Image: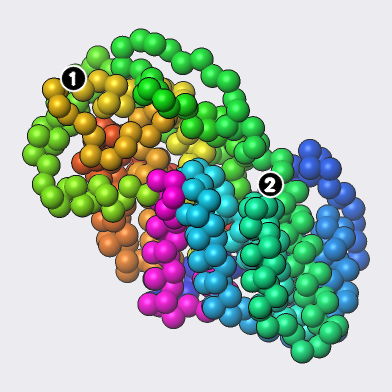
């Protein structure tokens, strides 16, 4: 069963922390931080209502709707937009770091819209507000897919009342616009163009022929819920010429010499590069599966997905910062065994730590806090993701060990913000 007390604590405080993230950067985002008269509603918890002037469209929408009780968020709405986001990530061949950002911002928009609607004291149609917010966010992230996204929104059922329809739509737009303002200033669009100079000493990474470093500046992207200095750093690796790393390289060659069909199947299953839902997408699929098994409500599913995606996004930032800080060689940069090649393609960025392991550690820890009875299963899958990269011939074992540990710390730092 879901850990009810823990879920309630998360539900009551998650949006306040997200708002704090907005407020933290409000000057650089050019948002107006002005006092506004709150709606006269008995709210156990206020979210963006206290700062509605940050996004005038939100304030207007909340006043447009008649007083009453908002509808509950349907689980089907959350699942539709989860699947739509995963399909876009796959069809547009989005890189794993950018895919994590897409998931985090889309689920954040959906979550904030439903949270505001439900706690407004107004007769909002929560499904409609959440769909508009998530759809608008996806249109921003995937401009080439705007026509298809608009068609998806047109096919959704609208509220019966024109007044509620308009107010709910305006609320969704207002929330999305505010989160888009945040996304425009997080540094993601500059991450792929950063000019870097990498060392050339023994044991350092070098791009293989035809490769270019992927997203070398991703480590400087602003995380969500946390500020940069609060993002746990990945522990430094042992030096290349130490006995620890020498033993790890020997162990790698031993594994490669004894690969089984099961090992290769595991490597292929977790490969999850561009053209797939990516590693975090696989964990979102796991979150959806667990949410169905535990019969969560739409609001609960939206909270699970938002926190999982945000922690995964933060984990990729921490991971990429370490990758280009330590610049550790890939096996393909070092192995000289005649005829050897990795079972899966070597990615165009340094080895340490493993991105799969880091995001898996973060996602597994978030989900284990929501579903404590599934902790053993979740961490078994996270370790399988880390091990798969060694079987695939593209990582050292220590990349996975340290990646899992770093991802877990990122998840706990994110959770500590809302406890």
In reply to whether residue 228 is colored magenta, the answer given is no
Whether residue 231 sits left or right of residue 110 in the image: it is: left
Which residue bears the numbered disc 2? 183
Q: Nearer the viewer, residue 272 or 121?
A: 272
- Point 58% across, 75% down: residue: 77
Nearest to the eye among marks 1 and 2: give it.
Answer: 1
Which residue bears the numbered disc 1? 336
- The answer to which quarter of the image holds residue 302 is bottom right
Q: Nearer the viewer, residue 85 or 234?
A: 85
Q: Which residues are magenta?
A: 273-302
In this rendering, the answer to whether 224 lies above or below 164 is: above
Specify whether residue 75 is in view.
Answer: yes
**Mark 1, secondary structure of its residue:** loop
Q: Position of residue 198 (x, y in %)?
A: 46, 16
Whether residue 347 sits left or right of residue 301 in the image: it is: left
- The answer to which quarter of the image holds residue 145 is bottom right
- Point 52% across, 38% down: residue: 317
Q: What is the basis of the colouring in this image?
A: rainbow
**Mark 2, secondary structure of its residue:** helix
Whether residue 126 sits left or right of residue 97 in the image: it is: right
Gap in angstroms between the C-alphas marked 1 and 2: 44 Å
**Secondary structure character of the magenta stretch overall:** helix
In this rendering, the answer to whether 264 lies above or below 38 is: above
Q: Residues within 10 Å of mark 1 (few under 14, many from 20)?
A: few
Q: Position of residue 179 (x, y in %)?
A: 71, 54
- Point 36% across, 38% down: residue: 354
């Amino acid at each position: 069963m879901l850990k009810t007390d823990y879920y309630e604590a998360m539900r009551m405080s998650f949006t306040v922390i997200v708002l704090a993230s907005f407020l933290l950067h409000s000057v650089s985002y050019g948002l107006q931080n002005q006092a506004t008269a709150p709606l006269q509603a008995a709210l156990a918890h206020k979210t963006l209502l206290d700062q509605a002037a940050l996004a005038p469209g939100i304030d207007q929408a909340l006043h447009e709707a008649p007083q009453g009780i908002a509808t509950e968020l349907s689980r089907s709405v959350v699942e539709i937009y989860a699947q739509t986001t995963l399909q876009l990530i796959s069809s547009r061949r989005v890189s794993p770091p950018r895919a994590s950002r897409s998931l985090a911002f889309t689920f954040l928009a959906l979550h904030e819209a439903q949270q505001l609607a439900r706690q407004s004291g107004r007769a909002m149609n929560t499904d409609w507000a959440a769909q508009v917010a998530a759809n608008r966010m996806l249109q921003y992230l995937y401009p080439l897919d705007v026509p298809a996204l608009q068609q998806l929104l047109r096919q959704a059922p609208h509220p019966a009342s024109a007044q509620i329809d308009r107010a709910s739509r305006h609320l969704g737009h207002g929330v999305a616009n505010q989160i888009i303002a945040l996304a425009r200033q997080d540094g993601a669009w500059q991450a792929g163009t950063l000019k870097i100079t990498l060392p050339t000493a023994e044991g350092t990474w070098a791009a293989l022929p035809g490769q270019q470093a992927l997203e070398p500046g991703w480590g400087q992207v602003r995380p969500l819920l946390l500020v940069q200095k609060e993002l746990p750093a990945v522990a430094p690796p042992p030096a290349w010429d130490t006995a620890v790393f020498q033993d790890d390289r020997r162990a790698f060659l031993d594994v490669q010499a004894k690969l089984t069909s099961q090992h290769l199947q595991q490597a292929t299953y977790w490969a999850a590069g561009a053209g797939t839902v990516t590693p975090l997408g696989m964990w979102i699929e796991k979150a959806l599966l667990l949410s169905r098994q535990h019969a969560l409500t739409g609001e609960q599913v939206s909270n699970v997905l938002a926190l999982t995606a945000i922690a995964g996004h933060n984990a990729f930032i921490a991971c990429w910062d370490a990758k280009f800080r330590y610049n550790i060689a890939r096996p393909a940069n070092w192995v000289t065994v005649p005829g050897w090649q990795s079972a899966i393609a070597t990615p165009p960025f340094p080895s340490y730590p493993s991105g799969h392991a880091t995001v898996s550690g973060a996602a597994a820890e978030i989900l284990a806090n929501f579903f404590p009875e599934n902790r053993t299963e979740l961490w078994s899958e996270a370790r399988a993701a880390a091990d798969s990269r060694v079987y695939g011939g593209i990582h050292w074992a220590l990349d996975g060990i340290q990646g899992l540990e770093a991802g877990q710390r990122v998840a706990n730092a994110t959770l500590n913000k809302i406890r």
